Amino acid sequence: MIKLLFLAGSAREASLSKQVAKAASKLAKSESVQATFIDLFDFPMPIYDGDLEENEGLPENARKLKALFADSDGYMIVTPEYNGFFSPLLKNVIDWLSRPDNLDIGDPYSGKVAAIAAASPGTLGGIRALPTLRTLLSGIGVHVIPKQVSIGFASKAIDNDSLFADERQRAMMSDTIDQLISTTSALKN
């Protein structure tokens, strides 16, 4: 069984990235894949601060989220685009999870496989955010698969059943998920 996490780099309730991540998790579920959507809204944490870490240690929600990442084989991250980059929320989460925990939670990044995607209400679908996210994840030991997806006009991409409304976008996401699963399976074995 392959365990994959699906998450969005946004905590906003009506987030387009969150809708895309949920729909992607539905595409991935199968007898051999445990696909779990996690909402960063459920894991609030302060902005990373070395003094806070030194005085209080890893925040409880960072420990919980780190354990979920460490227990997974890989993940798909769908980010919004903020001024050409991935979201500050996502950067903060990645930073906190990279910190030592002194609890032997496990490594949330090394040896993991990731697929990246972006979603936006505009034509480009957040594509400008993906190179920097790829660079960050690769730099901390995550194997980021070559395929990536950007979902333009994302407000129309997901239907009332939380599925991809557009066949072309669904096919692009399915191809990316297939590569995530096959790469994760190959590296796990």
Image: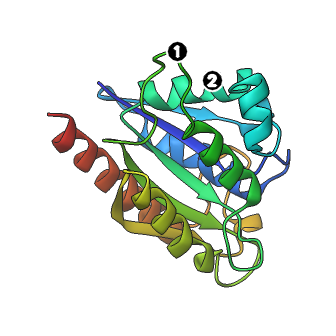
Of residue 51 and residue 28, the one placed in the foreground of this image is 51
Q: Answer above or below: position of 33 versus 14.
A: above
Which residue is painted at 27% across and 43% down in the image? 184
According to the picture, the residue beneath numbered tag 1 turns out to be 103
Q: Are marks 1 and 2 in contact (CB under 8 Å)?
A: yes
Choose mark 1 or mark 2, whichever is in front.
1
Residue type (three-letter) at the residue carrying disc 1: Leu
According to the picture, the residue beneath numbered tag 2 turns out to be 63
Disc 1 secondary structure class: loop
**Distance between the alpha carbons at the discs numbered 1 and 2:** 9 Å
Of residue 176 and residue 110, the one placed in the foreground of this image is 110
Disc 2 secondary structure class: helix
Q: Answer above or below: position of 16 versus 83.
A: above
Which residue is painted at 65% across and 40% down in the image? 96
Residue type (three-letter) at the residue carrying disc 2: Arg
- In the rendered image, residue 8, in percent from the top left (x then y), is placed at 66, 49
Other residues around mark 1 within 10 Å, as few (<14) / some (14–19) / many (≥20): few
Residue 63 visible, this orientation: yes
- In the rendered image, residue 86, in percent from the top left (x then y), is placed at 66, 66
Residue 159 visible, this orientation: no
- In the rendered image, residue 1, in percent from the top left (x then y), is placed at 29, 24
Other residues around mark 2 within 10 Å, as few (<14) / some (14–19) / many (≥20): many
Of residue 37 and residue 94, the one placed in the foreground of this image is 94
Determine which quarter of the picture holds residue 174: bottom left
Which residue is painted at 70% across and 49% down in the image? 92
Q: Answer above or below: position of 152 versus 174.
A: below
- Horizontal placement of 176 versus 35: left or right? left
Of residue 58 and residue 34, the one placed in the foreground of this image is 58
